[in-house]
Image (cartoon, rainbow, N blue to C red):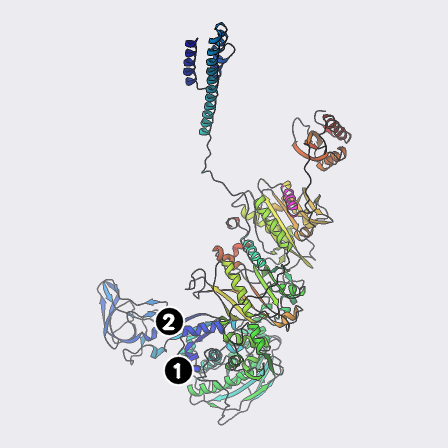
Amino acid sequence: MREKLELLTKEFDEMINAALKKEEIENIRINILGKKGTLTSLMKDMRDLSVDMKKEVGQLINEIKKDIEKRISEKIEFIKNEEINLKLQNEWEDISWPAEPVQGTIHPVSIVRKELEELFSSMGFEILDGPEMENEYNNFNALNIPDDHPARDTQDTFWLRNGMLLRTHTSPVQIRGMAGRKPPFKFIAPGKTYRNEATDACHEHTFHQIEGMVVDKGISIANLIYTLKVIVSNIFGKEVEVRLRPSYFPFVEPGFELDFRCQICGGTGCPVCKQTGWIEYLGCGMIHPEVLKNGGIDSREFQGFAFGGGVERLVMMKYGINDIRHFHGGDLRFLKQF
Amino acid sequence: MKISYNWLNDHIDLKDTAPEDVAQLLTMKSAEVEKSEWVNAHFEKVVVAEVKKVEPHPDSDKLRLATVFDGKSESRVVCGAPNVAEGQKVAYAGTGTVLPGNFEIKPVKIRGVESCGMICAEDELGIGEDHEGIMVLDSTLEPGIPLSELFGGKDFVLEIENKTINHRPDLWGHFGIARELKAILKKPWKNELKYRGLNPGKTDESFEIEISTKKCLHYLGLKIGNIKVAESPKWLKTRLQNVGLRPINNVVDISNFVMLETGHPVHAFDRSEISGTKIIIRDGDENEKFITLDEIERVLNQDDAVIADEKKALAIAGVMGGLNSGVKDSTTEIFLESALFSPTDIRKTANRLDLRTDSSSRFEKSLWIENSYIAVQRFVDLIQEVIPSAEIRSELAVADNSEGYGFKGNIEISTEKIRSVLGVEEKKLGNLEIIEILSSLDFKVTENGDILSVEIPDHRRSKDVSIGEDIIEEVGRIYGYGNIEPLSPLFNMDRAPINSEVVKKEKVRELLVKSFCSHEVMNYAFVKMEDVERVPFDSNRIVQTVDEREAPFLRYTMVPGMLKNLFENLKNYKDFSLFEFGRVYFDDTERKRLAVIITGKNARFLKTKEILASISKELRTPPFRFSRIKDDFMSGGTILHPGRSAVVSAIKDDIGIIGEIHPQLLKQYGINVPAAYMEIDIELLFDLPERALKFTQLFKFPSTFFDVTVIVPDKTPSEDLFKIIKRSVDAKLMVETQIVDHFKGAPIPEGHLSISFRIVLNGKERTLTANEMRSAQQKLFEDFRKAGYKISGD
């Protein structure tokens, strides 16, 4: 009996080691553990043994059976793993295959406009809008621009046959904004503006401006400088030197031009800043008392400052765009870059 | 406007201030200097030299070797000019000299022969155009004399950005700029221009001035005799040349000099061309023809003013003199005019005639009467210096018509207000300093406690100073804006009101970009006649620009721009989508719109509806309704395919159109692939109420479903089928109905379509039994059959 068991174990060892497929293992299992299997028939043979032997051999057979079952399941597990490994070896993706982004693009002017809106919003500015088709009063008269001012000429302004005009700046929103508000308030007004001029790489008849206004008691030029410094530094994400130069706009008094340090050359002079080291960025000033009056605000009680500048120039500087006509060109080769 | 540093130095002592600093100070305190450069610096290096010897070049037929003596030593120069000859006096630039154009003379070998320096041609020196040969100088000149002795020394020329002094009539001449520097540098005058009065010698005529037009405010006339017209002296020519003016003759040059110095244009007529002694300043006659100095015939009208004698016009007032009365070589007597004209009228005339002159551009700025006297004085002084024989031969004839011109009176302002607006404390800017600044700018200040009474000087009264804020600006700019410490405004804690339009627009923009791969474009507001013809619209409502242009109409739909974008981009791409937030314009209003265009595989009606469904979800709008386009809403009938388009409505308003673009319209824009399009009024869209979000409990028991496939004739609206389902199924059990499949073609009969619905039911508090499901399904089958539809499998 023992010899038979030893032989069986030995045969099993050989078979199980040689087996490569699940079916072979199943055959081995049937051959040994099946109803007519070798081990099963050995167990049947036990009937003829003495009680002591029965006990001893029975224990041995049970151990062998457990061992065989364990090794069979281990081998099956091993083969399954082998199969998976083999499958994985054949599964392959070309990781160099090109993939395109599945999304469109936001117009670069919208990107910068949004950044500006978020910046001003975070500083507590309200965002206002106004019509592009404006009346003469809001665009000129209310802003203290005299009747004979050259800006009113048809060479500068798109006059319309319905008696209106296309706003030449976002400043009429100052008048509209003041009308519905009581100081203190601060708002910005970004939007499209129009000038009747020929287009070239640096000039467009349609472009964007952003206007801002702060009105309260005791607002000063020192406040204006501080605010614009914060704004310019945030636009560039770092401290940027600014300077105020005297300039003239009918709707402010005193009026200034705000320059910032050229970020291309750092101030040593380059073609972008026309060798001056400074970039002229926005017009600003203390709101003219006449303009406050036209907005229904008592200039003896309240003071304020206003500022306005072009958006495209900022976008061009930010992305290195050399031709302003791209913005209204609708060319996907341009748009897809943003 | 160009300003000469040397010229400024005539009036104010600048020896301690570098020219570059002058430019910087003016930029920061007065007017922007946009460019500045040294001129004629090379004249101090280039010297007169004598050509001692000319020999042939050993290796060239064209080149020659000239030995020149520059007063100290001899040098040999390789010279290509044909006219070089022994004994000539020439302009010699030694090595190290920098000529105009930043051209530095270095020792070079030309065809093997060393050349030390260069014999210059006129153009190389920047004094002429001639490059035919070298410039040959007067043979009596001594070698070694620098050319600066012949052509003037170096100068630093500042170019002022004109638009920064449009509001400052006083800064249109050197004297005015010098006055700024006087205040900025706190220096006294070196030479102040003043009207001292004239001393006529023997007068032989007396002139009468008659002003019969509102366009002339003040007029001075003076006759000067014993004139000898000749070339101007070197100093005078250099002054003019350095600031970009071409010298003509002494009389004209002095007129120009006076204008560039005082800022006040003067005009000299040839006395002999004036009939009689009466000068009339009148409106132009309708269609009056007049030939100006530039020999062009101008047609005048009543909007112009002319200077005339009793017979004829002599000049277009303030703009340009006449060819008939200009100073000629033979002129011996002149009539000098120094006048003041109305700024607006001068601008109108100059614009209409397209004749903007140095004179007109100054009169446009609102000059001041007192300056016309200073200009006369300066002219007389100069003409007597340049032409010693010149004599005043008439009394100064004067006529005034200036009542109400310019600001009169004093400005009262408190020093506290000045400091409050500037944002500067008293310890930094005391009353005394404020008064000092104003006085240095020639304002007269009377102190009355903290209140200043400020008298405005003549040169600032005509236009730019009339209110307290103007005074604040004067103090601020001279004090220096750079000296103001930035200070944060005090803020309140209120949250700024949110602009919901901005927020919603941003949401829709993100949605289109992220979910629909659409690219944002911007198009012009202007469209052409052909666009208007392609998408016709009520002509009474179309807005048009006043002046004629290629694209004179304002768009009333966004579609032309989008189709042009499509056409252009189809050259490079075939499957894409574009969108634009823009405006459309009507006679009485403008509206904000969103347009989306799609071509390629998504150019289908359903895609536009999907976009709308996404927008609706994003903005939580009430549900949209869709109907066939009627009444040509938003020109939908022209823009869109009649069978594949819809009007979108919400609550009570129609808000837009969606669908596939009409093939005819595509063809007109040269497009031969399908495109889908939508145009939505975003003001209406964004005004829709927002649905509140409320969570619905999940069902405790699993839902079950059954399917039903219906065979329906083509063009059966799916909503009819949904209605049948809704009526048939117990509303208490209904969860949702989905279309799971739709199919056309065999074995479905011709002209029919099969649609499979999945009806999902839930018993809420229990699981539905198989029986309940089956009876619901049977009932629905029956209801479909009753409505005349066939159930698949029947």
Q: Main secondary structure of the magenta part?
A: helix
In screen coordinates, is B522 left or right of B138? right
**Chain containing mark 1:** B
Q: Position of residue B183 (x, y in %)?
A: 48, 79
Say the numbered circle drawn on residue B126: 2
Range covered by the magenta-colored residues: B607-619
| Numbered label attached to residue B233 | 1
Indicate the amino acid at tag 1: Pro
| Residue B441 in picture, x, y percent from top left | 51, 80
In the rendered structure, the residue with mark 2 lies on which chain?
B
Horizontal side of residue B325 vs B768, given as left or right: left
| Depth check, front residue: B305 or A196 | A196
**Which quadrant of the figure contains the C terminus of chain B?**
top right
> On the image, which quarter does residue A181 sit in?
bottom right
Furthest residue in direction right, as rendered = B786
Q: Are marks 1 and 2 in contact (CB under 8 Å)?
A: no
Decide which of A143, B126 is in the foreground and name it: A143
> Which of pointers 1 and 2 lies earlier in the amino acid sequence?
2
- Which circle marks residue B633 in the picture? none
In front: B219, or B721?
B721
**Where in the figure is residue B679, as x and y percent of width and height?**
64, 49
Crowding near pointer 1: few (<14 within 10 Å), some, many (20+)? Answer: few
Residue A214 sits in quarter: bottom right
Disc 2 is placed on an element classified as loop
Q: Residues within 10 Å of mark 2 (few under 14, many from 20)?
A: some
Amino acid type at circle 2 is Gly
Q: Using the image, determine if residue B107 lies above or below residue B367.
A: above
- In percent of width and height, residue B458 lies at 55, 82
Q: Nearer the viewer, residue B631 or A189?
A: A189
**Can the viewer see residue A146?**
no
